[in-house]
Amino acid sequence: MTCRHDSRGFALVVVLWSIAVLALLGSQLTSTARVQSRIAAAARDSGAVEAAVDGGIYQAIFALCATGGIGLSGQPVVLQIGNATVEILVEDEASRVNPNVASIEMLRGLMVAAGADQGRAGLIAGEIVDWRNRSAASVFGGEKIDLYRNRGLPYRSADRPFDSVDEIGLIPDMTPDLLARLRPWLSVYRNSDDTGVNVRQAAGNPGEQGLVNPNIVMRVTAAATIRGRARAVRSAVVLIHAGTEVNGKLYQVLVWE
């Protein structure tokens, strides 16, 4: 009798342990499913706001092509795209200087207007031109790399156009304070080879430079939000071909940021 009771007790323990293990496994599977569901929802929301941002930018571009940019600059517009709320801001870039094409004289004048003395203004203007030029020779004479080595910098000039205003901060004699004062005057983009537009490098003060003529350069910034779940921001500099097609295009996106 004792052996029979012992075997029944052991079987009961095994059953209880089995139930406990199965319950634990079920709990873990449920928890894993919840985590995976949350990850999937986050990925879906992230994709939705990114798509909404791009959709908002292109919607603004088509409106710019239709109106020539008149009346669309400076005031934010709010759209609902799917589950995302999208705020779009269009800014006229025509009064800004593009350091990728501006002459050294224009850049020097811009530095002075931002508060740099003549000597420092000329130095930074030359360093900007050195950065974007592919030649190893500096506009000051000698090798460009020497200036970076003399400053103890772990990098050299990029030998290509600037990708952003922030990148101008890498210029050896640029300071954060001066760059902050320059930002309102700057627009960094690259003209594509197929735009069919000639970029003027006009000299003089920043208000006279005329980046592209007679076309319109606009910056379109879109911020898409699914409240409490996801947010995305993107900006594009767009060349509008003034109501006429160039190589079959009414517009050209010069840069995405």
Image (tube, rainbow, N blue to C red):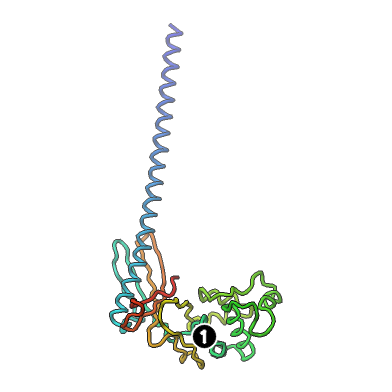
Give the residue drawn at x 40%, y 32%: 23
Task: Residue 100: give x, y in percent of width and height.
Answer: 52, 80
Is 62 left, or right, of 107 in this rendering? left
> Among all residues in the image, which is located at the extreme front?
247
The answer to which quarter of the image holds residue 145 is: bottom right
Task: Residue 189: give x, y in percent of width and height.
Answer: 47, 77
- Label 1 packing within 10 angstroms: few (<14), some (14-19), many (20+): many
Is 169 left, or right, of 211 in this rendering? right
* Residue in front for this viewpoint, 80 or 14: 80
The answer to which quarter of the image holds residue 57 is: bottom left
**Which residue is identified by label 1?**
102
* Residue in front for this viewpoint, 181 or 95: 95
In which quadrant of the rendered image does the N terminus lie?
Answer: top left
What number of labels is visible? 1
Task: Residue 142: give x, y in percent of width and height.
Answer: 69, 81
Give the residue drawn at x 42%, y 34%: 25
Task: Residue 148: give x, y in percent of width and height.
Answer: 67, 75
In which quadrant of the rendered image does the C terminus lie?
Answer: bottom left
